Amino acid sequence: MTQSTPTPNLLGQETVLAHVRQDLEQSGRAALGPPLRMPTLRGWGLTSCAQAIAAETSARHVFHLSARSELRWQRDLVQLTRQLDLKERHLRRPGDPLLAVRRWLRQHDDWLLILDDVQQLDRIQPLIAPLEQGRILLLLQGPTESPENWPPVRSVAPLNALAS
């Protein structure tokens, strides 16, 4: 992963981005969120930080899924099965997309998976828990801890506060 010059809308986030890069290089896992006990509102810049990391990555595949709601999570998983041209894209059972995506991720290692709007780890755990390869970046909403055996959550400052 190469380090680039921060875009103007990420000024002030250089330190947190450096920590995320280091976490991804060392363990393949990183989590970004607001300072503990603070709700996530628009303007925190989590997605902008993730986009900067994605632009710098050497990973061949970059996937961005939203865990905002169960419906959105399932829809994004189904879309990813289509993008990867997995045979399960035609199946109608709810667990099939998750199993298909997880199997693909386990069979490949040159990918970055960005999981956005994570409010509850139990929604994403079935996908990420068994994965040892690849890189995963969580964008946490609210005071959520990172999964067990992961680096600590890296806290961002709200971008609108940095701009003033």
Image (tube, rainbow, N blue to C red):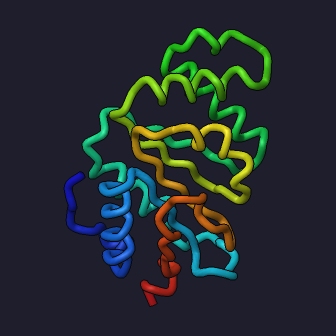
Q: Where is 64 relative to 2, above or below?
A: above
Q: Where is 163 relative to 2, above or below?
A: below
Query: How many marks on residues?
Result: 0
Q: Where is 5 relative to 101, above or below?
A: below
The front one of 135 and 65 is 135
Residue at horizontal 57%, vertical 21%?
Answer: 81
Measured as percent of width and height from the top left, residue 108 is found at 39, 27
- Left/right of residue 145 with respect to residue 3 in the rendered view: right
Q: Quadrant of residue 26?
A: bottom left
- Left/right of residue 32 with respect to residue 72 in the rendered view: left
Direction bottom: furthest residue: 164
Q: Quadrant of the C terminus?
A: bottom left
Measured as percent of width and height from the top left, residue 11 is found at 33, 77
Measured as percent of width and height from the top left, residue 7 is found at 30, 67
Q: Quadrant of residue 17?
A: bottom left
Measured as percent of width and height from the top left, residue 27 is found at 38, 54
Residue at horizontal 53%, vertical 59%?
Answer: 149
Q: Quadrant of residue 62?
A: top left
The front one of 133 and 44 is 133
The front one of 19 and 5 is 19
Residue at horizontal 68%, vertical 73%?
Answer: 143
Residue at horizontal 48%, vertical 72%?
Answer: 154
Q: Where is 161 relative to 95, above or below?
A: below
